Image (tube, grey):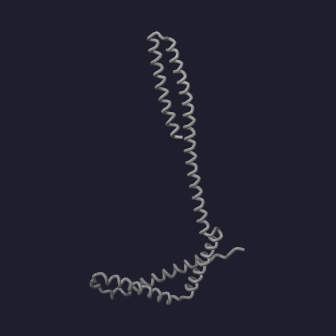
Amino acid sequence: MKNQRDKLHQYQKRITVITDRETDIARECLARGDKPKALLALRRKKFQESLLAKTDSQLETLEQLTSNVEFALVQKDVIYGLQQGTAVLKQIHTEMGGIEHVEKLMGENEDARKYQREISEMLGGQMSNQDEDEVEDELEALENQVQGVKQQDKISCPSAPDTALESEVDSTKAKERARARARIKEQASSQAPEPMLA
């Protein structure tokens, strides 16, 4: 179609050249006084102009058709893209297992959290303050071991005496442990499962 359009443009240029030449011929004939030949040249010019008008009309139709085809190709690409996107979404939904599978996973997740809360409540309720203190002492010892390994990599400096502060440290640790126990009990009571309504 584009080739045909280009050919029509070339044809229009040729007709324009012919009409200009016919006008020049008519002038020359009038200048010589040959009126019938001048009239014939003007008639040929008029015929060429009518061909030019038809060519314009055909060219306009051809350009409209070309733009319609190009737009249809764009639409085809858009539809193809939509089809591919829809296929990918369907595949993803299939891999997810559908809504029922997601709901099942959410239910299992909630059951696992409830079970973990029950275990935490049971452990928290059965441990005495002395047990809690021992657990915290063990945690502190493990932390010191881990930090000791890290500090061995560094240059060691002499440490300041700490004998005078031990009583203050023990009372501070006891207060921190009491606060931690209170927070744990508070969290356990706030996470207690709510009764199910019938």
Q: Residue furthest top?
A: 33
Q: How many marks?
A: 0
Vertical relation: 187 (above or below) 24: below
Q: Residue at x 54, y 21 (%)?
A: 46
- Residue at 55 percent of width and 41 percent of height: 67
Is residue 89 left or right of 137 when viewed as pictured?
right
Residue 96 lies, in percent from the top left, at: 60, 69
Q: Quadrant of residue 71?
A: top right
Residue at point 61% right, 67% down?
94
Residue 56, by quadrant, is top right
Q: Nearer the viewer, residue 167 or 35?
A: 35
The spot of residue 84 in percent (x, y) is 57, 58
Residue 16 in picture, x, y percent from top left: 48, 26
Q: Nearer the viewer, residue 30 or 72?
A: 30
Quadrant of the image containing the N terminus:
top right
User: What x and y, as percent, mark residue 194?
Assistant: 64, 75
Q: Nearer the viewer, residue 170 or 60?
A: 60
Tell which of 118 and 185 is nearer to you: 118
131 up-or-down from 83: above or below: below
Please state, as top left, top right, bottom left or bottom right, where the C terminus lies in the image.
Answer: bottom right
Q: Is residue 110 left or right of residue 14?
A: right
